[in-house]
Image: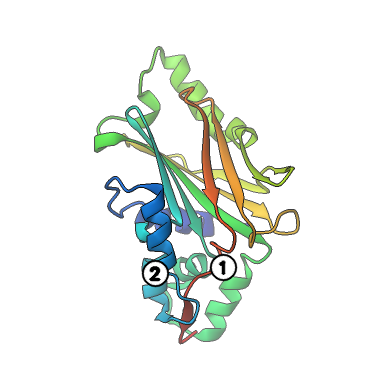
Amino acid sequence: MLNKRANIVGIIVLSAFFSCSDESTVSEETKQESHLEMQNIGMDLPLNEFVTWVAAKENDLTKTKEISELNYRLSYMPKECLAYIETKNTEYSKELFEEARTHYDGMTYFNLRIELKGGSGELLKYNLNSGQQYNDRITYMSFKMQKDVFLVQDKDTLYPGLFHFERIYEVAPYATVMMAFDNEKFNPEEEFTIVYDDKLFNKGYIKYNYSTKQLIDLPNISGV
């Protein structure tokens, strides 16, 4: 399980890559068709190309909801991608990569990034009423937000087993949290919905739907 700050920071850095893809308006039907066209379980990709494939918007593993001036972007983070960022600054070996990949066994990881459109201003100062409200927002994201994010599958509701807000001590138009759900408590091969009850900016329930086998219909990774 993720228990090292260095690993957490690495995942946050990788999430920035997942947030760079073009977000031009695409219908849900088009996204689903593109995903079906691109997903090919038999396709072999080198590890770095696999990471790029996962981040590509056509594959719909990253889902964005736009509400007024805000983007709410949820990205699925396969454990192979997490192991990639953990080991990419070291000399590659299959044994090292496999060891890193086992750190993330048993959980399914997601990154949630809330961002001001246009990238101007500091997110946590958006529509700010007072200095105290700014402090309250930091406290919310650090300690309370995890109670407002949950996964729904059939009649079951599951809260994150891991949740981390990466505090940025500079003006930034975004905020990022990492979360993970216990695979023993839900089936990542079946359809599910992740819901965020937004009490940061009071935008209501924001829902991200993942279809059956969407998280496992991925390319094979060659050379690992």
Q: Secondary structure at mark 2?
A: helix
Q: Amino acid at mark 1?
A: Ile
**Left or right: 16 with respect to 108?**
left
What residue is drawn where x is 25% and y is 32%?
120
**Would residue 73 be visible to someone looking at this image?**
yes
What residue is drawn where x is 63% and y is 71%?
102
Up-down: is 189 above or below 223? above
Is there a contact, CB below 8 Å, between mark 2 and mark 1? Answer: no
**As rendered, which of 29 and 97 lies closer to the eye?**
29
**Left or right: 47 with respect to 185?**
left
Q: Position of residue 88 (x, y in %)?
A: 42, 72
Instruction: Kindly report the distance in space between the C-alpha atoms of the residues bearing marks 2 and 1.
Output: 13 Å
Q: Which residue is mark 1?
A: 216
Q: Amino acid at mark 2?
A: Met
Looking at the image, is mark 2 or mark 1 earlier in the sequence? 2
**As rendered, which of 156 and 197 lies closer to the eye?**
156
Q: Position of residue 38 (x, y in %)?
A: 39, 69
Q: Secondary structure at mark 1?
A: loop
Up-down: is 126 above or below 130? below
- Looking at the rendering, in which quadrant would you find the N terminus? bottom right
Crowd around label 1: few <14 · some 14–19 · many ≥20 (10 Å):
few
**As rendered, which of 85 and 159 lies closer to the eye?**
159
Foreground mark, 2 or 1, reads 2
**Would residue 55 be visible to someone looking at this image?**
no
**As rendered, which of 170 and 121 lies closer to the eye?**
121
What residue is drawn where x is 45% and y is 75%?
40
What numbered label is drawn on residue 38?
Answer: 2
Q: In which quarter of the view is residue 53 placed?
A: bottom left
